Image (cartoon, rainbow, N blue to C red):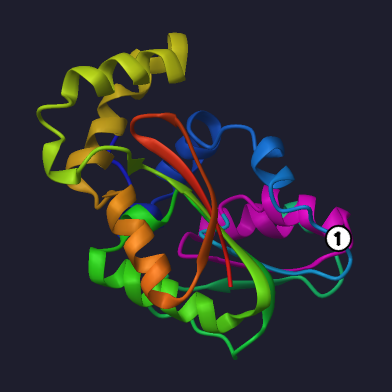
């Protein structure tokens, strides 16, 4: 199974495999946002629409962006009956919105498709899309060690991954290392630089494994 380039995500098989095997539960992640009826929520790389559906259940207005027709079709099903929901087919590099359009923005397991420069540009755009006090949460393969030290930390990654994924690790291993070496993950130093340089305040960083981090930032 190939992992995660923009071209790959146009393939039906990859999107379906991700939803079944790698998406994981979103309940805990969603709880970080504290969605309510006053929110305008943007999910970049919205996948099957689960996070948007959770936000909509709390009364939020929701917008999702994805490049995959399969994922957008799943999102439409997840949001069936939700008034005012917006779904957009676009790359993260090309999508754009007016200033101060949203109160909360999510990028979960999607920013590793972007180069370092593209990450910075997107974070800058998100800063302008958010209302004052708005929240951005990024969860992805964000390494706790320097990116250029992937090889020397390989044993640590293997150990953490075997614990993080449990008995599923052998099935996920090839896709995982495809993402680590052939996609464009970053480390915490790189990501926090982009956030702070843009003007965000970092509220919290959680790293349940050396290769995975959740970063919460406020405008």
In the image, taking residue 45 as reference, residue 1 lies left or right, namely left
What residue sits 19% from the left and 17% below the top? 155
Counting from the top left corner in percent of width and height, residue 87 is at: 64, 70
Q: How many marks?
A: 1
Between 41 and 133, the residue placed more toward the observer is 133
Question: Which quadrant, please, contains the C terminus?
Answer: bottom right
Secondary structure under badge 1?
A: loop
Vertical arrangement, residue 197 with respect to residue 81, above or below? below
**Residue 168 vs residue 151: left or right?**
right
Residue 168 vs 59, above or below: the answer is above
What residue sits 68% from the left and 36% below the top? 28
Could you say where residue 144 lies in the image, as x and y percent from the top left? 32, 38
The residue beneath circle 1 is 36
Asked if the magenta segment contains residue 165, the reply would be: no
Depth order, front residue of 210/51:
210
User: Could you say which quadrant of the image residue 63 lies in?
Assistant: bottom right
Most extreme residue toward the bottom, as rendered?
Answer: 98
> In the picture provided, is 168 more to the left or to the right than 136?
left
Label 1: how many Cα within 10 Å (few below 14, some 14–19, many 20+) = some
Q: Would you say residue 91 is visible in this rendering? A: no
> Is 64 in the magenta?
yes
Please provide percent x and percent y for residue 52. 71, 57
Bounds of the magenta segment? 47-76
Closer to the camera, 50 or 26? 26
Residue 199 in view here: yes
> Residue 163 in the image: x percent, y percent?
42, 13
Farthest residue toward the top? 167
- Is residue 149 shown left or right of residue 133? left
């Amino acid at each position: 199974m190939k992992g995660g380039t923009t071209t790959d995500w146009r393939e039906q098989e990859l999107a379906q495999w991700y939803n079944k095997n790698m998406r994981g539960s979103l309940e805990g992640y969603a709880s970080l946002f504290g969605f309510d009826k006053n929110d305008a929520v943007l999910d970049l790389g919205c996948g099957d629409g689960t996070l948007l559906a959770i936000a909509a259940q709390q009364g939020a207005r929701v917008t999702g962006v994805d490049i995959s027709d399969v994922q957008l079709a799943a999102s439409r099903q997840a949001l069936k009956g939700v008034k005012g929901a917006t779904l957009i087919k676009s790359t993260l590099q090309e999508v754009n919105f007016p200033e101060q359009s949203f109160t909360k923005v999510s990028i979960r397991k999607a920013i590793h498709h972007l180069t370092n420069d593209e990450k910075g540009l997107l974070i800058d755009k998100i800063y302008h899309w958010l209302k004052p006090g708005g929240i951005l949460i990024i969860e992805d393969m964000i390494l706790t060690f320097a990116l250029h030290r992937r090889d020397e930390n390989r044993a640590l990654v293997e150990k953490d991954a075997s614990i993080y994924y449990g008995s599923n690790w052998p099935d996920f291993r090839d896709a995982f290392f495809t993402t680590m070496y052939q996609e464009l993950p970053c480390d915490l130093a790189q990501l926090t630089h982009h956030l702070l340089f843009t003007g965000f305040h970092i509220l919290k960083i959680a790293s349940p494994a050396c290769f995975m981090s959740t970063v919460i930032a406020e405008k």
